[in-house]
Image (cartoon, rainbow, N blue to C red):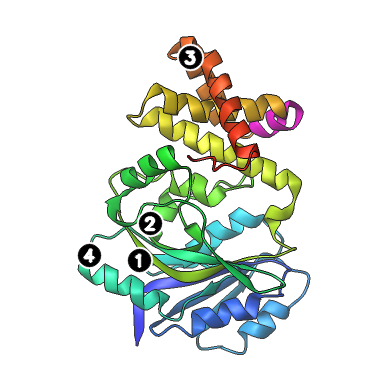
Amino acid sequence: METDLVTIVIPVFERVDFFEEALKSALNQTTQCHIVVSDNGSSHDNFKIICDKYPKRVEYHKNTANIGMFPNWNRCVNYVNTPYVMILGDDDILSPDFIEKFLGVKTNLPSLDLFYSNYSILYEPNKIIENNPLPNYWGLGTMKDIKYYAIIHFLGFPSVSCVCRTELYKQYPFEERIHGCNDWLSIYSFNNDIQTFGLNEKLCKYRKHSKSDTKRSEMRLIMALNHFLILSKLSLQEDVSYLVKMKWIGLLHLCCITHKKFVYKYLEKDSGYKNIYSLLKTKYTFLYNLSVVLGAYHMAKSRMGLKLWE
């Protein structure tokens, strides 16, 4: 079977180690769909050589220069002419029935904006497979449900295994200036009323390996900062208790003061923290110090091996 409803896009750059396996998982779907590969100006032609094996199935593009990781993601979306798009990591693997499962849900929910499934984690080089440890909202809902669930339990939206209306990614493009959790920065900005459906079946393998971008210590710090920035923004927007608001704002503030030199230079690119800081000084002045105490408490819980979102 074939569908004209969805395109799988695969942004790539330099690293070719797992690409063909990822591409084949897109090609071998029980319901075939459009596939686009966008090479971000790699120094070799290995991606093109692999894509040329499937000339009728794969649309290949190569940038004349490296425009940056997330500008390339945005460019991928601009290549799409179908109502929905799925962004597949060049080292991840889709279950053969991923698109079929999406279409089954879409048939019953014509107004569906965002579909996502659970996934497992594949650790290299030993091929160890573990369950996704992050919390998430499953079943029929709205973006408001996903946001509220994140505020209470921690971020966990499985962007590695989601299908989104193409127009949403165009309306909320990926942040291009900063790098770290950019998929969550975009998705958690979606309007509250969009219709979502989360299927609690493992339809994707998210690969972790030594060449992963998230292995770098600087990247881990940026990701932690963005986790707390997203959660602080969400908690101030939604109807949750002051203690929940202050937990996330406190963790953000603690992260900032702990890594001051690095963080403030980084935050010059994003006004989000500055806005939250100003709001703390005005609307939540009396809870400002409490936020730091709560942040320290939850950071200590995390370092003692307890789950941060408990």
Distance from disc 2 to disc 1, alpha carbons, whole Å, reads 8 Å
Circle 1/circle 3 CB separation < 8 Å: no
Say what secondary structure mark 2 lies in: helix
**Vertical position of residue 100 compared to residue 134: above or below:** below
- Residue at label 4? 110
Where, quadrant-wise, is the N terminus in this rendering? bottom left
- Residue at label 3? 287
Residue occupying the far right of the picture: 43
Does the magenta portion include 200? no
- Residue at label 2? 167
The crowding category of the residue bearing disc 1, from other C-alpha atoms within 10 Å (few below 14, some 14 to 19, many at least 20), is some
Distance from disc 4 to disc 2, alpha carbons, whole Å, reads 16 Å
Q: Position of residue 223 (x, y in %)?
A: 62, 44
Q: Amino acid at mark 1?
A: Pro
Numbered circle sitting on residue 272: none
Q: Which residues are magenta?
A: 259-268
Distance from disc 4 to disc 1, alpha carbons, whole Å, reads 12 Å
Write the residue at 51% across / 12% down: 281
Say what secondary structure mark 3 lies in: helix
The crowding category of the residue bearing disc 3, from other C-alpha atoms within 10 Å (few below 14, some 14 to 19, many at least 20), is some
Circle 4/circle 2 CB separation < 8 Å: no
- Can residue 268 be seen here? The reply is no
**Vertical position of residue 289 compared to residue 240: above or below:** above
Distance from disc 1 to disc 3, alpha carbons, whole Å, reads 45 Å
- Residue at label 1? 83
Distance from disc 3 to disc 2, alpha carbons, whole Å, reads 39 Å
Closer to the observer: label 4 or label 2?
4
Say what secondary structure mark 1 lies in: loop
- Can residue 215 be seen here? The reply is yes
Distance from disc 4 to disc 3, alpha carbons, whole Å, reads 45 Å
Say what secondary structure mark 4 lies in: loop
Q: Amino acid at mark 3?
A: Leu
